[in-house]
Image (cartoon, helix red, strand yellow):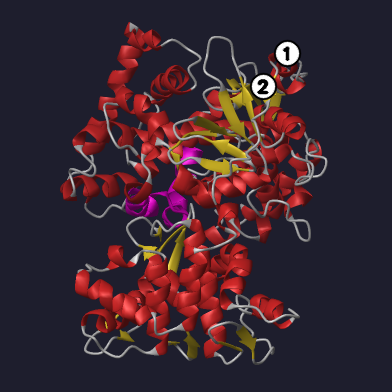
Amino acid sequence: MTLTSGVMTRSLTLIDELVLTLLNEESGYFRQVPGWNLNCAVVGAALAELSLLARIDTDMESLILLDGTATGDPALDPLLYKIATEKSRRSAQYWIERLAPQAESIIDMTLDRLVDLKILQHHDGDFWSLAGSAWRMGFHTGSEVGTAVEFVKTRISRAIFNNEIPDPRDVIIICLIDTCDALRYIFDLDEESEERVQQICKMDLIGRAIAEAVGHNIAGPLFRRSALTKQIPVVKLRRLLRSEHLRTRNIPALFAEIAEEHGPVFQIRPPFKEPMIFIAGPQTNYWVHRHGRMYLRARDYFEDMEKVYGGVGLLPGLDGADHFRYRKSVQSGYSRTRLEERLDEVFSYARNHMASWAVGQEFRAVRMCRLLVNSQISPLTVSIESQDIVEDLQTFKELALKAYLAKTHPKFLLKTPAMKRRARLIDEVVSRVQSGHTPAQRAGCPRDLADDLLSIHTNDRQFLPESNLRFVLSTPLLASMYVGDELSFIVYAMLSQPEFHEMIRAEADAVFADGDPDPKTITGPAVDVTSRFIMECLRLYPTVPMSVRNVMNACVVEGYELPEGVRVHIATTATHYMKELFPDPFKFDIDRYAAPRKEHLGSGYAPYGLGTHTCLGSRQVEMQLVMNLLMIAHYFTLEIAPENYKLKISPFASMCPNKKLKFVVAEKRHELPV
């Protein structure tokens, strides 16, 4: 199959076609294919492609090397090299079993290639869908023009249902998908068509070898739960209480320290409570990001919190296809592009708020930063003013998180008159948003997140019912809590390190010298120090240091079995303090993120979470943090109060500086433009 795009012509390989056919657009990931079967099918596709390229051949007993010359395809050449350097002649089944562990890297390269070809679009959380350009490329399927996926499916359906003589490529693809037991989910197969599939599969030796490797594999136990799993170690409470990091409330550093002593999976047994299982480390982070969607579920942990807001099926508690559909529906509202399109307005919102800061005035750091961020997020996302109610909303949410998720506070505290009053403000948010989002009110206005959400509600009231609007429309205001908490850490870090303060101030003065910077400036080399400074703050002070999931399918992680139903605490940011990933991890070092070090690449750097629930607005947040820090550095000189303050962290419901940290406006460096 040849893809023509502009002047470039590229052919899709059998691996490309297999991945495209197995992609489930509803869930944004592969159809639920068992790992061993998928690995065998992917390697089988690679060997079949090598056969079509005349590099190998097969007979009933062995796989034969014809030509060891590299193909130039990074997914194929490592396999070809292993075959070429093997001294003995081996069967196709032997090679499929031996090479199966390399399937994941082949899949990664294939997905990257399809994204580069603009056939697939990659979404945060490792989801994929057909790219918009894929619908316009014009893949001819005979009488019609369709997408790359339709091209492959049409060929397969003609071979199965029309009894057409299949092309050798089609025989292989049918056999591969049948091996994965996924044909029944793509086509409606009756007895006759299933018999036809079996006939087609017998036409190809590679296909038969794959089927045998799956049915009689000798390496299968490596991919299944093992009876020889290790016992999960228990962290003694007295050891826990002796930790300096527990006293300073540095949760990521605490779990990094425990993981170094006890390994990547361990348990803590609090008095009078159920044992708590934790996983922490680069390998567990990778496992969660890549495989968590198959084994972990968010709903169980979040369902009590849903009741607080009177909703069901809210985004933090969704999994699978519904979760992906929801993310796709609102991703534009959380995108950096949406912020870039309205950057001038956001600067204006921030300056209007800063205009109330007077020289000599003292602010509690967390409150100051939360209100500053909300002054921008509220009009940007839901087009309402909410400074008068946002603190009460955040107080209510913090207590709800502590009572229902962290379980550090009793639930009856939410029933007090003060909390009931705060809870009623959620309905006030809904009322303000709805009254400001009538057709007449929105005419000529730029689209915001509330427009997206109300449109989903109007078009599919079952997917986003009215009962969920209380949560989804107030969430952006509550998000300013997390972004504001991170900003308070960042401002503290800048003020407590004069050498960095000077460098950030120099960048800020330069980018504001000729007016407000454009999006390219605010994300480019002109703010390199500021950007890397913020990345280091996100490493040292992540506001959400871990996530919690329930195991929905029993699994083995790093040799430890996690039974179905058990609750797992995923210390995603423990890696931020692991010296094998971040040498001298307690040192503030912004050069970690510059070439050649680039220590943040990979799953060890996870300030926005991992896997399917990775923060939707991470790129928007990054830009907003840069923008706010530059504005603070340009327009004001702030000082820490008390002068000898040493950072102390409040860990629940999210990490933030404790209430004793204050910022004093010492100087107004530049006038704020009207």
Residue at the spot 21% in from the left edge and 52% down from the top edge: 443
Residue at the spot 57% in from the left edge and 62% down from the top edge: 104
From the viewer's side, name the closer residue of 604 and 42: 42
**Residue 264 horizontal side relative to residue 190, left or right:** right
Disc 1 target residue: 238
In which quadrant of the rendered view does residue 435 lie? top left
Residue at the spot 32% in from the left edge and 7% down from the top edge: 417
Q: Is residue 605 visible?
A: no
In reply to whether residue 330 is colored magenta, the answer given is yes
Mark closest to the chain's N terminus, 1 or 2: 1
What's the CA distance linking mark 1 and mark 2? 16 Å
Disc 2 target residue: 249
Q: Name the residue type under label 1.
A: Arg
From the viewer's side, name the closer residue of 312 and 496: 312
Where is residue 306 shown, x and y percent of the image? 33, 28
What predominant SS class does the magenta segment belong to? helix
Q: Is residue 552 visible?
A: yes
